[in-house]
Image: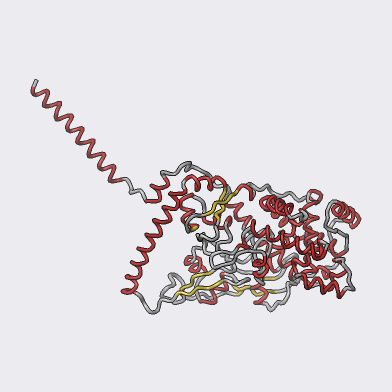
């Protein structure tokens, strides 16, 4: 009996010891959970989905359509187009324009110049308009709400297409910025804040509010929406001068010859855009549906300074989405000030996650701030021991029209290194942003000198500088003009163009 008891005791002890050993070994094998992961594990309603997929994000952030529209308005001259051939009889166009005129407070008259612009857009920009119509579903409901508030015709929403091609980050070569292309002084006049951290000209909501106020005030001056639109582009002073030079005429088409070229193109481009949107079905234009509208996002006032990276890590939302929805913040950081609140815009499901876990979000920001201070102190100590005098870092501010290829040539480094140093996925860069460039061979990890190759491209029928540039990564239309001493945008089939790659 004693032997049986002893056997049972040792058996139980052995299995207990084995189980304890297995548990210890398993615990040792499990990776240590990070502070971020442990914090997110406590989030309320943690499982959410992104509202904006990558393809839709890319479309909303498009730059190519803006470039097309910018060239059409600023560099082309519609009176020199000749008779554009497109299957749209003049009598049908006149009838349709008359119907638009009857239901709009904006005067819409048929002119041969307007017919030419409409036909040119339908012939050359049909695909672009299909894309613009999809993007418009995102913004137009918000535009219409504000236009209605200020008794501005709802058709004025089409002006944002001519101004920016609905790109909230659009920036013209003269510095006009955002969906409604405000210059710095005009933005300040309508209380759009511009600081080292913030540029509210990029904010769709605030810029739309300012645009409505500005357009309403211009209409009060001229009493005509076409003249108000011309003033929005050229300034009321230039329109007043054009009226005087035209013998006091108050009709846009009568004073148009005395307006700057861009303004002479501007109102016809607006009216042509309105026509194409209103008669898209008749021209076989089928826009894609927008998966989300601006009203499916919302804002919250931040209570502490927080970065886009911290928000991205906590809410599992790509930084690109945060940047798109919050374009006013220049350095991807939302500042906190007691005198003026600053807001974070997110898809509503992500905003709900933020609100439900607000204290934990700010606790994480505080934690990272303290960690950063410790790391900075450590790095300073390390640098005093190991700093080398030949380590030079330059910061290049991107100008309008510059390409990543041109910048790499300027500094004698490779495209891949510039992309690596600045965490770029492709060759797209944006004017106003800053690139970090290591300029010595010591710092370049792969190629110390970048030598461009010159190719010859023979222009084909239907080519434009823009479409040719698209064939070569990192090349812009401006690059081609510079390399080939082209002053305007006109090219002819059979021309040989130098392309540096």
- State the image coordinates of residue 213 (x, y, percent, origin top left): 71, 60
Q: Where is the N terminus found, in terms of image quarters?
A: top left
**Residue 417 horizontal/vertical position (percent):** 48, 68
Instruction: Tell me if 442 is positioned left or right of 474 in this view.
Output: left
Residue 453 found in image quarter:
bottom right
Residue 458 coordinates in the image, percent (x, y): 69, 71
What residue do we see at 48% from left, 72% from top?
A: 437
Q: Is 258 left or right of 290, judged from the image as shown?
A: right
Residue 326's image quarter? bottom right
Q: Residue furthest top?
A: 1
The outermost residue toward the front is 339
Residue that appears at 54% across and 68% down: 196
Quadrant of the rendered image containing residue 155: bottom right
Whether residue 174 is situated above or below residue 153 in the rendered picture? below
Residue 222 coordinates in the image, percent (x, y): 82, 65
Locate the C terminus and report the quarter of the image it occupies: bottom right
Q: Nearer the viewer, residue 53 or 327?
A: 327
Q: Residue furthest right?
A: 91
């Amino acid at each position: 009996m004693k032997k049986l008891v002893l056997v049972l005791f040792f058996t139980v002890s052995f299995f207990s010891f084995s189980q304890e050993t297995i548990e210890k070994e398993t615990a040792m094998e499990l990776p240590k959970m990070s502070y971020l992961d442990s914090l997110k594990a406590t989030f309320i309603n943690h499982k959410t989905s992104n509202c904006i997929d990558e393809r839709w994000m890319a479309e909303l952030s498009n730059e190519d359509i803006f470039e097309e529209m910018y060239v059409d308005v600023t560099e082309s001259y519609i009176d020199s187009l000749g008779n554009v051939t497109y299957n749209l009889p003049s009598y049908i166009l006149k009838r349709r324009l008359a119907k638009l005129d009857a239901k709009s407070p904006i005067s819409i008259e048929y002119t041969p110049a307007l017919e030419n612009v409409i036909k040119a857009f339908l012939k050359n920009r049909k695909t672009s308009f299909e894309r613009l119509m999809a993007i418009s579903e995102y913004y137009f409901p918000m535009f219409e709400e504000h236009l209605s508030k200020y008794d501005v015709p709802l058709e004025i929403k089409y002006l944002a297409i001519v101004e920016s091609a609905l790109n909230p980050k659009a920036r013209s070569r003269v510095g006009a910025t955002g969906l409604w292309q405000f210059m710095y002084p005009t933005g300040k006049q309508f209380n759009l804040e511009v600081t080292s951290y913030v540029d509210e000209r990029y904010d769709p909501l605030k810029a739309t509010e300012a645009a409505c106020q500005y357009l309403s005030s211009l209409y009060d001056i001229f009493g005509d929406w076409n003249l108000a639109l011309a003033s929005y582009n050229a300034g009321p002073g230039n329109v007043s001068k054009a009226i005087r030079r035209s013998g006091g005429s108050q009709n846009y088409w009568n004073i148009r010859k005395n307006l700057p070229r861009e303004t002479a193109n501007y109102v016809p481009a607006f009216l042509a855009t309105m026509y194409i949107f209103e008669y898209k079905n008749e021209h076989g234009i089928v826009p894609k549906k927008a998966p989300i509208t601006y009203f499916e996002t919302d804002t919250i006032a931040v209570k502490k300074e927080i970065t886009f990276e911290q928000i991205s890590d906590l809410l599992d939302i790509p930084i690109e989405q945060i940047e798109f929805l919050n374009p006013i913040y220049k350095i991807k950081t939302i500042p906190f000030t007691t005198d003026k609140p600053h807001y974070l815009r997110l898809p509503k499901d992500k905003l709900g996650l933020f609100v439900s876990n607000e204290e934990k979000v700010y606790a994480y920001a505080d934690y990272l701030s303290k960690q950063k201070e410790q790391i900075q102190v450590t790095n300073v100590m390390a640098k005093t021991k190991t700093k080398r005098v030949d380590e030079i870092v330059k910061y290049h501010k991107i100008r309008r029209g510059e390409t990543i290829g041109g910048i790499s040539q300027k500094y004698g480094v490779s495209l891949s290194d510039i992309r690596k140093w600045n965490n770029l996925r492709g060759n797209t860069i944006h004017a106003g942003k800053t690139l970090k460039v290591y300029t010595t061979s010591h710092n370049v990890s792969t190629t110390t000198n970048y030598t461009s190759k010159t190719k010859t491209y023979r222009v084909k029928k239907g080519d434009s500088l823009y479409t040719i540039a698209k064939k070569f990564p990192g090349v812009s239309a401006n690059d081609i003009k510079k390399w080939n001493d082209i002053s305007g945008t006109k090219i002819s089939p059979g021309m040989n163009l130098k392309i540096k790659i």
